[in-house]
Amino acid sequence: MTAPLKGIRVLELGAYTTGPLSARYLSNLGAEVVKVEPLKGESIRGFAYKIDGVSYIFHVHNLNKRGVAIDTMSDRGKDVLLELVRTSDVLIENFAFGRMKSWGLSYDDLSAINPGLIYCSLSGFGHDGPYRDMRAFDTVIQGMAGVMSLTGTKDYPPTKIGVSSADNVGAATGTMAITAALHHKRRTGRGQHINISMHDVQGWMSSEAWAYLDAPGGPQRDGNHHSSLAPQNLYETADGMIVIEVETQTHLDGVTALLGLPACALEAGKSREAEFDDAFSAWAQGIATEDAITDCDRHGVPAGKIQSMAEIAEASHTWSREMLVELEHPTSGPLKLLGSPFKSSQSPGVVARTAPAIGQHTREVLAELLGYDEATLDGLAKDGVIGIQE
Amino acid sequence: MASPFCIEDTLVLEIADGWSAGAAAGRLLSELGARVVKLEPPEGDRLRHIGPGTDGGSSTSFRTLNTNKESIALDIAANTGHQTLDALLAKCDILLTDQTTITDRAAGLDPNALADRHPHLVQCHFSPFGLTGPLAGRAGGDFVAQAMGGIIATTGHPGELPHKAGPPLAVHNAALVGGASILAALYQRADTSNGALIDMSLYDGMVSLLYTFMPGYFISGKAPGPQGNQHPMAAPWDNYPTKDGWVIICMADDRQWRNFLDLIGKSELADDPRYMTNDERVTDEIRPEVNQLVIDFLADKTTEEALKVLTEGQVPAGPIYDLLELMEDKQFQSREMVQTLLDENGTPYLTPGSIFKMSETPGQIYRRAPGLDEHSEIAS
């Protein structure tokens, strides 16, 4: 089996999450990713929870990649980078708007030397519009895109999604846009500039609620309830919590059978929400979580427990799906890392190697892709233009 | 002249009701140029009948999600329906299916059997837990995937019952990951002529988001609970009260922390070992102290004043908007993220613009949502 993007070369210039994650997704699909870091390494290496001085999260985001260290602020370093750009299909960057241009690395600069380059910029608000200069991190984006206003209850201020939704869904958007642009490139030979805004993407996620814009006060957060379907809620069981999720008439028929209530049309479910909540709360408090889920299963009612990070890390389903994998790091020992969500009959998703040390592959990549000989590499390293991990 | 599309001459059949990952993926592919035909049961997609707008024939949500698509109605459980479906699939490049829809409508529609009969097809089957593994076949949608996938356990406030992500995070995330997987398989098909069966699980998509919590868990063994609005690896990071509301502040690194100290006139604290790096500031002991510095600084400022001074001082900050404010937001509007279309009755409705902003082949919104079976000629 051959991975679908085998042979596609991706150059990653970025830090933290969005750019590196988007590039890792492409590597899971088979693309060859070269991560370019400054000589001191990228910023997320310094995040909390370290192994041998490197943050664990760096390892998670950067598996599969080869790492090259270049001082791209120097003229000679920039020349090396431009040579790499010439050999690449895709460039991913997630710097603040304007930074790449200030370094002479804008899309216009780079498409001039490689017209086939697909150049993907991932930023908080995009590279145009009145907020393009604003610095933004995940929670700021969630707040400004209305996502927080829909999350939590009225008893608390708007609440963020616990995970970094803006970073992650933004990264996935970049990945899908890049795979689309590859089709256009194959047809025309031309690359293009992809200009993804995390704010756009979070706002797009809120669109299910746009139907309620005309309601008094607009769409509101309502805990675990769904805006138009019921029952959907979280209930406390004898030993934990479950969620019940009705989406279809078949599900709702199962609910009324399970609870011994009169049948109900799906469209009318929301008007009987309080009745369903009362009945489920009473039922759930006398039953263990696992038994509750079994009962729901038997009645065709979708249900699940609230799994913590610990339960997910222990769950046989997680390992069976290879969503957690254990890879042996050359110096730090075995590491539990994220697997590939891209499961296809053509390819199970590529998970090949642990994240690079700073400059681990500088020598290998510059020799292989640019034909640099040993003397050239040693000279560049000695002058502080590139970093080589020996 | 209109821009060209990324993908051309690509026919997609979508068998996915409701606000599901399959239907969201169909919408995304349509923006990139695919012709997406939504196959509905004779009574129509269940989303047509739920929520505001149903008195106009279809709910507003249905129109919002299914803009750009065409519609045919077909009872695929009937024998003749199966034959029509097979004839359609012979012409299609991509098939999108969703587990809930398939279980509800036609138990015989097995992704593996379809792959055997139509080896050229790139099909993507969306389901809560995937086609393999101990939980395969278990029922669920966005909410169950958020629960089982660790999102709910970390959303909400410490000491309270946790909450789901308000927007359907599992659905939208799976639509994008599945969409990338589909386009990659289609790219490969041009060389091999072989289709693919993509097994896209909402659970897998959610687990992919847990990287924020893996370091703490795998190093300290501590499984995180509801986060409030804080970040496990960075501080100060929270919503903070102003005189008239809230601001979000996110100091991701030590440079931003020093920017903040300069702003409040306490630059000397930058060298205080108790606060110097995120490693110290995120601890249970120190986090409340650094948060208090922010709270004190904001006490005499309105949200607008706070945002102005924080932004000028290079400290990442933002307001909290509700959806009415989002619709009026000048950035969202400038990026053409709110589009107004007329439905088949001539009534305006809103749908998001394309999130694919691309210089040569931007994602496009070009067709109102279809009436039920409005494009029946496709099946004949």
Image: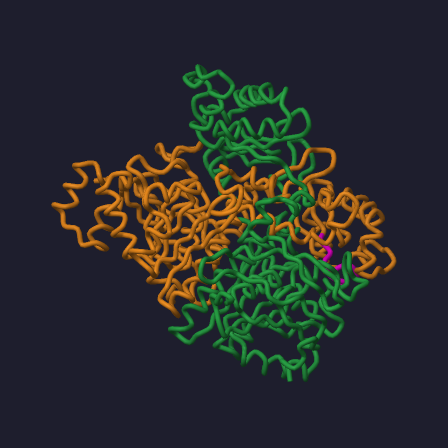
Chain colours: A orange, B green
What residue is rendered at 55% in x and 48% in y? A315
**Which of the 4 quarters of the picture holds residue B219?**
top left
Magenta stretch in the rendered image: A245-253
Residue A32 drawn at (x, y percent): 34, 56
**Which of the 4 quarters of the picture holds residue B43?**
bottom right
Residue A59 drawn at (x, y percent): 39, 42
Q: Does residue A262 appear left or right of residue B101 in this picture?
A: right
Residue B237 drawn at (x, y percent): 54, 30
Q: Does residue B248 appear left or right of residue A56 in this picture?
A: right
**Foreground: A164 or A174?**
A174
Q: Residue furthest right?
A: A262
Say whether residue A364 is magenta: no
For the C terminus of chain B, which image quadrant? bottom right
What residue is rendered at 84% in x and 52% in y? A271
Above or below, comparing residue B77 to residue B271 in the picture: below
Q: Does residue B20 appear left or right of residue A68 in this picture?
A: right
Above or below, comparing residue B259 to residue B199 in the picture: above
Residue A230 drawn at (x, y percent): 77, 53
Count of numbered marks = 0
Q: Can residue B134 be seen by looking at this rendering?
A: no
**Foreground: A122 or A126?**
A126
**Foreground: B197 or B220?**
B197
Q: Residue furthest front?
A: B1
Above or below, comparing residue B309 to residue B27 in the picture: above
Say whether residue A247 is magenta: yes
What residue is rendered at 33% in x and 60% in y? A115
What residue is rendered at 27% in x and 50% in y? A82
**Which of the 4 quarters of the picture holds residue B325?**
top right
Q: Can residue B161 be seen by looking at this rendering?
A: yes
